[in-house]
């Protein structure tokens, strides 16, 4: 684990600092003890000195994704989790975009016929927009393996040092909907 990795929990608990080193998955990064993550619900962490991720526990499952929303950089660690069309999503607190926890797909409601009354809608996918990372649990230690797919994803643009510097200099606020 890199010394640059810093964990932040959304509750007042803190993760154990050093994991036992048995059966570590390759290229994995220690996030914390499972019980600490379950208790906190959400953990944010800089992984491998280059990626800000969110690890969350919901309905017995652990998920990991880029922490900044693909739309405009909203803080997903503050988003609610809701089900849409049978799929669990995190809802960005800034403009309410819905992102599936499992795939990082952006979901939206499309209107079937704008002239029909009442309006009927159905759920559609914009495709994968948010980079999802792999979570592994070994002996109740939780690790994340970064998704290094070369396919660009929209959430990547908020993972640059330039963006982080901008955040440090100006408080993070919702931007107008784009
Ligand atoms: S920043 Fe997430 S919905 Fe706009």
Image: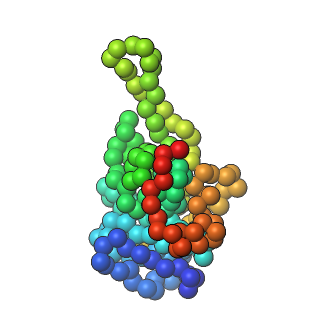
- Residue 39 in the image: state x and y as whole percent: 29, 70
Instruction: Left or right? Give the position of 130 relative to 139.
Output: right
| Residue nearest the observer in this picture, 116 or 129 | 116
Q: Which residue is depicted at the point 34% across and 43% down?
A: 83
Whether residue 128 is visible, yes or no, is yes
| Residue nearest the observer in this picture, 102 or 166 | 166
Q: Which residue is depicted at the point 54% across and 38% down?
A: 126
| Location of residue 59 by image quarter | bottom left
Residue 123 against residue 18 in the figure, above or below: above
| Location of residue 84 by image quarter | top left
- Residue 172 in the image: state x and y as whole percent: 46, 64
- Residue 116 in the image: state x and y as whole percent: 39, 13
Instruction: Left or right? Give the position of 1 relative to 17.
Output: right
| Residue nearest the observer in this picture, 100 or 169 | 169
Q: Which residue is depicted at the point 54% across and 73% down?
A: 169
Quadrant of the drawing holding the N terminus: bottom right
- Residue 70 in the image: state x and y as whole percent: 54, 52
Q: Which residue is depicted at the point 61% across and 58% down?
A: 156
């Amino acid at each position: 684990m890199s010394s640059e990795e810093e964990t932040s929990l959304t509750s007042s608990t803190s993760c154990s600092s050093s994991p036992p080193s048995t059966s570590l998955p390759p290229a994995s990064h220690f996030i914390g003890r499972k019980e600490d993550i379950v208790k906190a619900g959400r953990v944010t962490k800089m992984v491998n000195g280059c990626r800000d991720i969110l690890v969350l526990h919901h309905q017995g499952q652990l998920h990991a994704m880029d922490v900044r929303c693909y739309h405009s950089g909203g803080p997903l660690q503050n988003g609610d989790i809701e089900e849409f069309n049978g799929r669990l999503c995190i809802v960005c607190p800034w403009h309410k975009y819905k992102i599936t926890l499992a795939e990082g797909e952006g979901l939206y409601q499309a209107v079937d016929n704008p002239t029909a009354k009442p309006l009927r809608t159905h759920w559609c996918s914009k495709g994968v927009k948010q980079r999802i990372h792999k979570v592994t649990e070994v002996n109740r230690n939780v690790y994340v393996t970064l998704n290094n797919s070369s396919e660009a994803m929209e959430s990547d643009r908020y993972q640059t040092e330039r963006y982080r510097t901008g955040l440090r200099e100006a408080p993070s606020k919702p931007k107008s909907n784009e």
